[in-house]
Image: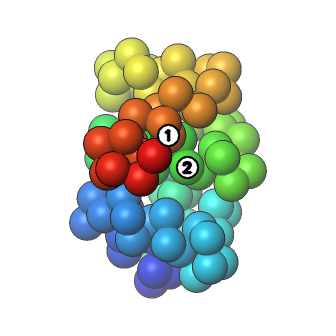
Amino acid sequence: MDEIIYCILNNSTDGAIRCLETNKGGIWSKSQTGETAMELAILKNNKYIVAYLIKYGSIPNAKEMKTAINNENEVIIEMVRTGKHLNIIKEYELNKGVV
């Protein structure tokens, strides 16, 4: 299992960010059952990981969009639909005390 998939499954936003920053499992990684990193982050309702996946180049596909709609998280739906992720990243960094 890719490290990023492990981090997403365990809802570890910091771990997923580290993976993306160091290329330890990329945006195109898939779980053993075939879900993409983006799909798993959507299913976990983790808007921060979704935002960082977009930041690092993930472009949500139709299946991921459907997953977002089915999951009914309006913030994630909007992000997946528009790609606008910067405010979510800023919110995460402020909550972590990074900025």
Instruction: Tell whether 51 sits left or right of 1.
Output: right
Which residue matches tag 2? 52
Of residue 68 and residue 83, the one placed in the foreground of this image is 83
Point 59% across, 51% down: residue: 53
| 49, above or below 60, in the image | below
Closest to the camera, between mark 1 and mark 2, is: 1
As shown in the figure, which amino acid type bears the numbered disc 2?
Tyr
| 50, above or below 14, in the image | above
Point 55% across, 49% down: residue: 52
Q: Is residue 43 visible?
A: no
Instruction: Tell whether 77 sits left or right of 97.
Output: right
Residue 89's disc is 1
Query: What number of labels is visible?
Result: 2
Classify residue 61 by image quadrant: top right
Classify residue 32 by image quadrant: bottom left
Mark 1 residue element: helix
Tell me where residue 4 appears, x and y as whole percent: 47, 72
Q: Are marks 1 and 2 in contact (CB under 8 Å)?
A: yes
Local packing at callout 2 (Cα closer than 10 Å; few below 14, some 14-19, many 20+) is many
Tell me where residue 99 appears, x and y as whole percent: 45, 46
As shown in the figure, which amino acid type bears the numbered disc 1?
Ile
Local packing at callout 1 (Cα closer than 10 Å; few below 14, some 14-19, many 20+) is some
| 18, above or below 41, in the image | below
Which colour style is shown?
rainbow
Point 33% across, 20% down: residue: 72
